[in-house]
Amino acid sequence: MFCQECGKKPATLHFTKIINGEKTEFHICESCAREKGEGIPGSPNSFSIHSLLSGLLDFEHVGSSNINGIKQPTLRCEECGLSYAQFSKIGRFGCSSCYQAFADKLDPLLKRVHSSTVHSGKIPKRSGEQIQCKREIEGLRRDLQTKIEHEEFESAAQLRDRIRELERKISDQ
Amino acid sequence: MTKHRFSQHALSEWMKDEGPESEIVISSRVRVARNLSNQPFPMLASDQQSKDVMDQLTWVSQAGKLKEMGAFETIVLSDLSELDKRVLVEKHLISPNLANESRSGAVILSNNESVSIMINEEDHLRIQCLYPGFQIKEAWTLANGIDDIFEEAVDYAFDEKRGYLTTCPTNVGTGIRASVMMHLPALVLTSQINRILSAVTQVGLAVRGLYGEGSEALGNLFQVSNQITLGQSENEIIDNLYSVARQIIEHEKAARKRLLDESRIRTEDRVKRSYGILSYASIMDSKEAAQRLSDVRLGADLGILPEVSPQVLNELLVMTQPGFLQQTFNEKMSPEQRDYRRAELIRKQLRGEKGHGGVEI
C-alpha cells in the first residue's frame, strides 16, 4: 500500500480511529507524516502524528535546527552502534544492549505503550534462577510484613528463615 | 517446482479438528518472541551473524527435545520459490516479513502445521502455535513448552526489569501475542460490531480485519489480540483475551438468534443468494468471494444450508487467496484470470464435482 498523501512511498504509518462508530483511517509514509506534523484533516479532535511520534519516542530533531546550534552529544548504543535518534525514527532496537544504553529514555515510552515499565511474567528457567530467587524473596518479604502486622510471629519466623536460605543461595552463586 | 507438503493442501491438518466454539472462532494463536543474548537483533545482524543464529536455532530443533513432540520439517526460506512463500503467508504459517525481508530466514513446521517456529524474522526466534476453535489457553501451554525447550539450549536476551528483550518495544516483556480469529457476521449485520469493537480496544486489546489492507474486515473475519506485553503476566494476558473473546462469542450467538427470530426469511434469502452465486458464477473477485463465503458459512452454522460443511469453507478461505490459486492451477495468472479460476474452484468445491478434499494438483 502506498502513502495516501504523496502516493510514492510505501505507507508505513497506519492509523484507525473509531469514535462513536465512525471510522477514520490514515495510511501515510514517514516523510509525509513528519511534514504534516500538526494533524491530519478529517480527524475529529485533530490528533497529530508528530505529537504521537515525539510523545512516544521522545523524538529528537536532528534536522536543520541543529546545524548551527551547539552540538549535543549523541546517545548511542556502544554494542551495535544504533543512535537514539535512529531508534526513535525506526522504532526498533538494534540489540539487547540498546535497552541499557537508552534506559533513561525508555520509561515514558514503555509506559505509554504498555501502561507499565517492569516485566512481571515468565522468567527463563536456566539463566533466570537468580531472578526467580529474588522474586520469591520479594514475595516472602511482603508476606512476612503482613504476618508481623497480624502478630503471627511463629509463621513469620518460618518466612524469615526461608528468606535467609534464599539469600544464601544467591550469594553462593 | 518444489512440492512441499504445506503447498499441497489448503487446509492444515490442525484445522481439520473441530475446536470448541468452532462455529464462531476459526482459530486461536499464540506467538512468542525471543532473541539470543549474544547476537545483534536480525535488523542489524551481519549476514554471517544471521546465519549463525539460524544454524544455532535449527540445531536445537533437530537435536533437542522438540523431536519428542512429533515430526518437524525445517524449511530455509531462500530455498523456496516466491509462490511457495506466498502460500505459507496465506496459510498464516509465516509472516509477510519473514517471507520478504529476512536474511537467513527459516521456518520449522510441525507436521500438522500447528506449530511454526520462525527464525530471523523481526526477532531471532518466534514460536507460533495455532489451534482450531477457541483454545487460546491450550495454544499458550504448547508455546510455553516449546519456549522452555529452546531456553534449555540457548541463552535468551532477558533483563530482570524489562523481561524478554525484543526488537520492537511493543513486544518487550513477555514477548507474547495471543490472538483469536472470529467470524462475526451477525454482529456486522445487526450493526453492533463497531460498538463492541471499540469497547474491546479500550481494555488493551486490538482488533484487526483478516485479509485485505487496513482494518476493513473482509468476510466478517476479525482478529482480536493483546496489545500489552509488559507489566502483565502471560496468564493475565491470556485470561484477559479469553474473557473478552468469550463475551464477543456470546454477543455473536445472541445476534444470530435474533437474526433467526426477527428476520428469518431475510437471512435465509441472503444466505441462499450467496450460495447460488458462488455455485454458479463465472467470475469471482476475492472481496466478493470473502463476503459470500461468509454468508454461506453463516447459513451452514444456522442450519439453513445443512449440505455445506464448515470445513469446506475453511478450505476455500485459503484456497481462494491469490498465491494458493496459482499453486493449485500451477500457472501464473493475471488478476482477471484469478477471478475466473477462483469462481471455477468455488463452484467445484461447493457442488462437490470432485468430492471432498480439494482439487487435484
Image (spheres, rainbow, N blue to C red):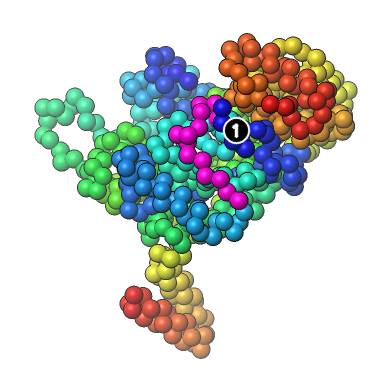
Left/right placement of residue A42 relative to residue B181 reads left
Q: Is residue B81 magenta?
A: yes
A116 to A64, vertically: above or below: below
Q: Is residue A121 something that shows in the picture?
A: no
Q: Dot 1: within a 10 Å radius of its alpha carbon, few (fewer than 14), some, or many (20 or more) residues?
A: few
Residue A68 horizontal/vertical position (percent): 11, 27
Is residue A142 highlighted in magenta? no
* Chain to which the residue tagged by mark 1 belongs: B
Residue at 75% x, 21% y is: B346
Q: In which quarter of the image is the C terminus of chain B?
A: top right
Q: Position of residue B21 (x, y in %)?
A: 75, 44
Apparent side of residue B178 relative to residue B220 in the rendered image (left or right):
left
The three-letter code of the residue at mark 1 reads Lys
Residue labelled with disc 1: B3
Total number of numbered discs in the rendering: 1
Residue A93: quarter of image: top left
Q: Can residue B4 be seen in this view?
A: yes
Q: Identify the residue at horizontal 34%, vertical 75% (top origin).
A: A173
What percent of the width, then of the height, locates residue A23? Answer: 56, 24
Q: Which of A70 and B324 is in front in this view?
A: B324
Quadrant position of the N terminus of chain B in the picture: top right
Q: Bounds of the magenta span? A: B71-84
Residue B212 versus residue B199: which sits nearer the camera?
B212
Query: What SS does tag 1 mark?
Result: loop
